[in-house]
Image: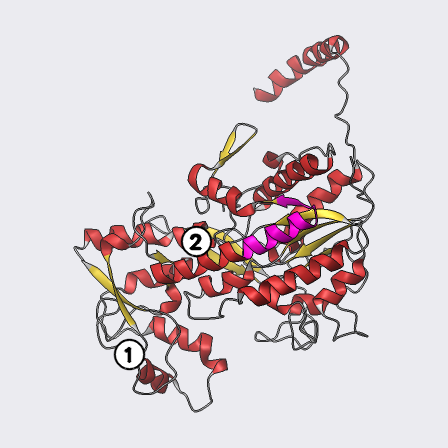
Amino acid sequence: MKNYSLKRTLPALGLLGLGLAGCQPELEEPTSNKGTADFTKYVAVGNSLTAGFMDGGLYREGQLSSYPNLLAMQMAKAGGGAFVQPLFSEAQSNGSGYLKLTGFTATGSPITASVTTNLALRAGATAARPLYTKFTEPVNNLGVPGIRMSDIETAGYGSVQGNPYFERITPDASPTQTYRQRVAASQPTFFTFWLGNNDVLGYATSGGAGAGITSNTVFTTLANGILDDLTAGGAKGVVATIPDVTNIPFFTTVGPTLRATLTAGNVPGIVVTTGTFSTTPGTPATRKTIATTAIRDANGNGNQLFTLTAAPYLGLLGRTNNGKAWRDVYGQVRGALPPAVSLSVFLAIQGVDTTQAFGVSPGNPIPSTLVLDDVEQTTVRTATTAFNAALTTKATAKNLAIFDANAFFSRVAANGVVSNTVTNTAAYISGNLFSLDGVHPTPRGYAIIANEMIKVINTKYGSTLQPVDPNASRGVLLP
């Protein structure tokens, strides 16, 4: 029946379409001009956000969706030159591997699985030391996942003992070349600079138990130096600030569910450890009691944040004889411990007795790695503010454009962002902007970031780069 109807109506529609086309005025594509900028050689400097990392991994789709790639396509219409990214090949398109959504539990919690096919791992790679297929041609996208400002002058950071993503794009003949040297040698006519997020992010995502925050003095000195390098030849560009990471889904998704569960069970509060783990026998890890009402809910009430990685352990709260959370923590830190520190020794040093009720007794608290408490949040925000002041001061002194990513993502967290009548929010999975790792954007999120950068480029340099259509890019892929 449907096919019959199509055969009858298509010729008529075709004729109607021809008639309408004949009446339409000619529409000219908006003109893209460079203004006072020179896009002949655009170079992107930064970390995972610049590389196109998403869903917990770096893979070809993310690379193609990266904001630098989108910017370069728009710049090409205004005299921009070729923009080369270190793309994974089609055969190894899944790169480092990543997370995909496979379904939801009966209570609506997402179920994810790791993609482990078509990876770009090369011979000699191990789980502890991944090595990726080399890409040693000159590249314009110098985004390196995981890099901190404090890493940019570290010799050997691009060696097999260093960062595997930087090692992948470092020529074999110069394994000791630093990131700053690589950037200085790139000699762009235009650049984007979004570096420094990991100098606070690593501390935050580890619940204050892992990597420390870079000192402001070190951060400022290194940022000033690399920006001097980039502008030495007269290049213009954009400097992006660092967002307040406590607004991202990694920290805002689990708390509301945990608070509702505890409230329903009339549980007044929980016990966590805070800060780093103890390394001194007889001095257990510091405990902290958190009232249920202090856990941040969906409306932003409460000042205690639980990480996305805490989700698998929520069902264990109150159970006795369960040490899964602490076994997992031991598995994560054991590489940094002396060989003599077994699981039982580690637990003894922390003062943990896993026979007690998990999460509600001081003897078996929730590990620090799963919660960013109010004190730790203050530490993160203080550093972020100082880093952004340093970046803004230097960018202003160099007369560069500034993309205030911190202000932008704060607005997104509060009100979302509308793209061509479609509202996108910071909600996990349903918000369209953040990928499954809760930290990095989706392709749509990267497109929106590209448009925000285009705005500041046009304003600063009088150019007329045209925005991209974010709605043409996907959010989280549903199964």
Q: Which residues are magenta?
A: 387-402
* Residue designated by label 1: 352
Residue at left 40%, top 67%?
A: 369
Residue 191 lies in the magenta-colored region: no
Residue 465 vs 257, above or below: the answer is: above
| Amino acid type for the residue under numbered disc 2 | Thr
Snapshot quadrant of residue 330: bottom left
Residue 442 seen in the current view: yes
Q: Quadrant of the N terminus?
A: top right
* Residue designated by label 2: 246
User: Secondary structure under badge 1?
Assistant: loop
Prevailing secondary structure of the magenta residues:
helix
Residue 393 lies in the magenta-colored region: yes
Colour convention: secondary structure
Of residues 121 and 376, which is closer to you in this image? 376
What label sits on residue 10 in the rendered view? Answer: none
